[in-house]
Image (cartoon, grey):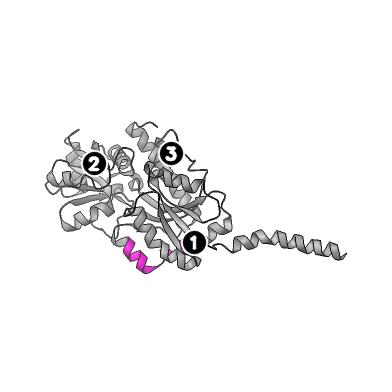
Amino acid sequence: MRLTRRGALAAAGAMAMPGLARAAFPERPVRLVVPFGAGGNLDTLARLAAPGMAQRLGQPVVIENRPGAGGNLGAEIVAHAAPDGYTVLVGSNGGLVTNPLLMSRMPYDAARDFAPIGLGFRTPNVLVVGPKLPVDSLAAFIAYAKARPGQVSCASAGIGTTNHLLIELLNAATGAGLVHVPYRASGASMADLLSGALTASMDQITTALPQHRDGALRILGIGLAQRAALLPEIPTFAEVGLEDGGLVSFIGLLVPAATPEETRGRLQQAFAGALGDPALQARVEAIGNLLATPEERTPEGFAALIRREAALSRRAIALAGLKPE
């Protein structure tokens, strides 16, 4: 009977150990993998959130920049990492939505290989024009473009980017007929806008806002369903007929799909808590980003946003006539 009792106690202890191990998370530093280089929007926002997460997790949260393949390299690292919560993806539209739709070969399955933790930020895209264009509103710009079919150019950060796809959706909603001109990066079109060689550009607000504030360039419209508190005078694309304002760039956290639920919960609580810091909120909003709503900071809310952006991106890709390569 003593042996039986000892065996039962040992078995009970063995059954409890996995739970204890999960409850101990984290026992070492957590790394946030940013699939782009230092200094970009993803990197900036990850570095703003990391200290608050570290404080709540009781362990360092380190940023690891792994750029390459349009964001796929960093995403692949996380998709194939141990599902223990110590390797977290700072994910965005490219690696989670547009790349899977436009690349025939992907090193991971974006829908299957990741579990969302929560959305952190949304970065609206804005329509920017040069100082010489004789229009003073979004509606006037649409009318100007419609009166000059095939003559009004609009730049993006490249074929298949979120701002390119937003141009396609805006054309379909308004009949503006903007001629897409792809550049190689966000902000690359600014010099041509200033010189008058380019009529307009669709770019992230974080890139365009400094020039707008200085008066060098003008933001005429913003890709949101409702006006932004930062620029309440700027109309939304929804106001000229684009449902919900179209696509928006997003940034959130994800982990390998098999990560235990308890571990995901710890990460979500730490991330949501970090986003609640008023100092962080002020810095994020000052550069034009929008904080996720409380619902969007949950796994379910973030997953719903990804599904919405994927549906809109599929429609825009069809409008543009793009095929996977």
Crowd band around label 2 with a 10 angstrom C-alpha radius: few (<14), some (14–19), many (20+): many
Q: Label 3 belongs to which residue?
A: 100
* Residue 59, horizontal then vertical, whole percent: 49, 65
Looking at the magenta stretch, what is its main secondary structure?
A: helix
What kind of residue is marked 3? Pro
The residue positioned 40% from the left and 40% from the top of the image is 99
The stretch drawn in magenta includes residue 129: no
Q: Label 1 belongs to which residue?
A: 29
What kind of residue is marked 1? Pro
What kind of residue is marked 2? Ala
* Residue 219, horizontal then vertical, whole percent: 21, 51
Q: Which residue range is magenta in the image?
A: 267-284
Q: Secondary structure at mark 2?
A: strand
Above or below residue 250? Residue 157 is above
Q: Label 2 belongs to which residue?
A: 155
Q: Nearer the viewer, residue 25 or 285?
A: 25
Q: Secondary structure at mark 3?
A: helix
Q: Secondary structure at mark 1?
A: loop
**To which quarter of the image does residue 243 belong?**
top left
Crowd band around label 3 with a 10 angstrom C-alpha radius: few (<14), some (14–19), many (20+): many
